[in-house]
Image (cartoon, rainbow, N blue to C red):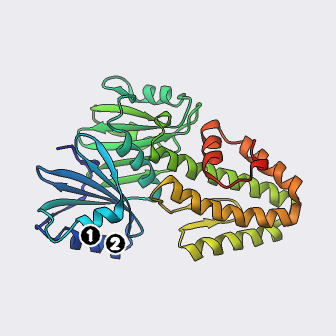
Amino acid sequence: MTNAIFAPASAEQIAVPAGQLNASLQAFRQDLQTGLIDVDIPGVSRHYLLFARGRLVNVYRSAAQVERLEPSGWLESVSAASPEACVRLLALTPQAVRILKIMIEQKDDQRNVALEHGNLEAQFATWMEHPVPALAHVLWPNAEALAIFPGQGGPPRYTLFVAANQVLHSAGSVMAIYGWKEPYVSATLFSSGAHTLAWTEYLLNHAFSRFISHLLEKFEQLTGRILLNQVIRDVNFTATAHGWNVRLNATSFTDQSIFSSPEAAAEAYSRLLEVIFRQLEAALGDAMLDMLVNESLARLAPPYRVVIKDYLAIPQARKI
């Protein structure tokens, strides 16, 4: 049986009698929770369930290898005859769920760079120079951490640290990681070069946010806040109408949605791009819009630019 993810966390653990597994998940769904449910069926299998606002978005079966399952099909399989299970619940942020998916999908990949001994701060400094985005996983006897690196010299963009009575999220601070007073058991780097579905989802999320933030910043410089506010209203109305938990304002794009696949994320982002392009084209004309799109794409690092081109509905004339 595989070891539990975030085992050091003091997550609530529930013994579920045979036939009651589906019913035990209802509270998490009804409370609109975001996070991880670890379902351990002793001697049989372990499943990781990832929720976003009460909706089951991903299911993984972890045995000899990790397998991504279709959520609705898995729920249908949890019938009244489901065996006895042990369930752990851990509330997380949407960003933490995104990077947790990366670790789950890649933890058995032999291309990972693992370190068993050495100075952790020095190793992180080396990993910051990794040429493409990467995820570090550090395991201590009584704590566990994830840190996402943007690649090409940047510091961590997001960190997650878990220990007994602690689940710490940070927009890049490594203080909790460096300050933990135990020798670590292992430190592993998962590179986005593996091209897993989880990496594609993460890269697409970040690329879209950076792309439209720069595009609308340039639009405001050319036209002013009044027209930008109209774009913001239309984008937020469209997102709300489709049930996407995203929010655009004058300075940033916040995405709290967790999508089940890169294709599902791309469908949502493409709909929002249609709204943005329609407004910008009416105000600026085709030629100026093409110039701003190309400039915003060019500002992205190659891994992000590639995933935008592969998945989003940007007209061919507006691709670099």
Q: Position of residue 10 (x, y in %)?
A: 24, 55
- Type of residue at label 1? Leu
Q: Position of residue 98 (x, y in %)?
A: 45, 52
Tell which of 51 and 286 is nearer to you: 286
Image quarter in which the N terminus is found: top left
Mark 1 Cα shell of 10 Å, populated few (<14), some (14-19), many (≥20): some
Say left or right for 266 vs 173. Answer: right
Asked if the residue under mark 2 is in contact with the one under mark 1, i.e. CB atoms within 8 Å, the reply is yes
Tell which of 70 and 265 is nearer to you: 70
- Where does label 1 land, which residue? 25
Query: Which residue appears at 75% of the width and 69% of the height?
Result: 231
- Where does label 2 land, which residue? 29
Query: Which residue appears at 35% of the width and 45% of the height?
Result: 104
Q: Circle 2 — which element?
A: helix
Mark 2 Cα shell of 10 Å, populated few (<14), some (14-19), many (≥20): some
- Type of residue at label 2? Arg
Query: Which residue appears at 18% of the width and 54% of the height?
Result: 40
Say left or right for 17 vs 29. Answer: left
Q: Circle 1 — which element?
A: helix
Tell which of 69 and 105 is nearer to you: 69
Is 226 above or below relative to 125?
below
Query: Which residue appears at 13% of the width and 68% of the height?
Result: 81
